[in-house]
Image (tube, helix red, strand yellow):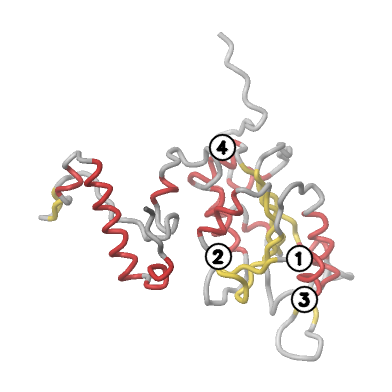
Amino acid sequence: MNNPPRSHRRQSVRPSLKPRELMQDTPDYAGVWRAEIITLFPDLFPGVLGASLTGRALQEGSWQLRTHDLRSYGVGKHRNVDDTPAGGGAGMVMRADVVGPAIETAMAGAAGRWPILYMSPRGRRFDQAMAQDLATCSGVTILCGRFEGVDERVMQHYGVTEVSLGDFVMTGGELAAQAMVDATVRLLPGVLGNADSTVEESHSSGLLEHPQYTRPAEWLGHQIPPVLMSGNHGEIAKWRLDQAEQLTKCRRPDMWAKYSPKK
């Protein structure tokens, strides 16, 4: 019997492929979520995105990743991508006439709701709600910053949204972009084997996740809480909610202040 044909959203990939090769010469599939990454270091991708669940989903064509090398849009003989700040000051600023054409190229095939994000320490804090929202988009274009930042005219002209992982500064936006894409891709349909996993985990309900246990039932004198071994699913659900609320109240008072229990 002949094997059934693969879906048009899947692609045949040899097991010997290295993560970087997963991004090469792949056609654009209609309806597949895609990340367009603008960076000075395209060889850093897919990085961790080429491993585990995100890597398997990338291999299967459940999502796509493309990089755009900013250096190829550089100006002059030396492909300069930055210049000194207007008005003086330390460091260098990424040029508008370099970043702009890169964004134009990255957005050329974009359709539907497709935000342009810039990884920046002055941006809005990335959270689970943003990941959930990005997962409902057609795709996302992410600009990875370097140096002192990007010419502000780029932000204004393209309506770029600045996003931050937290109140700290990194040498570039590549690691932050990978973290954000990972958090988003795992929410795409079919990427996780159990869809309930995304419902019960930390931040999805406004609470931190309850403690988890597995076999053996006793380890170094420590027992699994008896309620989890009772088989009473109602009591188990109540215990988990109570634990999640206690953890959140203790560890994240900022989240607890915003939490509204479901009726």
Q: Which of marks 4 and 1 is nearer the N terminus?
A: 4
Q: Do the residues labelled 4 and 1 touch (CB within 8 Å)?
A: no
For disc 1, the marked residue is 159
Count of numbered labels shown in the rendering: 4
Tell me residue 206's x, y (percent).
42, 60
Q: Which element is circle 2 on?
A: loop
Q: Which of 154 and 28 is in front in this view?
A: 154
Task: Give the number of the disc on residue 152.
Answer: 3
Separation of marks 3 and 4 at Cα, in angstroms: 44 Å
Q: Which of marks 3 and 1 is nearer the N terminus?
A: 3
Q: Identify the residue at the far left of this view.
A: 221
Task: Give the number of the disc on residue 113.
Answer: none
Crowding around mark 4 (Cα neighbors within 10 Å: few <14, some 14 to 19, many 20+) is: few
Separation of marks 4 and 2 at Cα, in angstroms: 35 Å
Dot 2 amino acid type? Phe
Separation of marks 3 and 1 at Cα, in angstroms: 11 Å
Dot 4 amino acid type? Ser
Looking at the image, is mark 4 or mark 2 nearer the viewer? Answer: 2
For disc 4, the marked residue is 16
Tell me residue 230's x, y (percent).
16, 41
Dot 3 amino acid type? Glu
The reply, left or right, for residue 122 in relation to residue 94 is left
Q: Which of marks 3 and 2 is nearer the N terminus?
A: 2
Looking at the image, is mark 4 or mark 1 nearer the viewer? Answer: 1
For disc 2, the marked residue is 126
Crowding around mark 1 (Cα neighbors within 10 Å: few <14, some 14 to 19, many 20+) is: few
Q: Is residue 167 above or below residue 73?
A: below
Tell me residue 191's x, y (percent).
52, 41
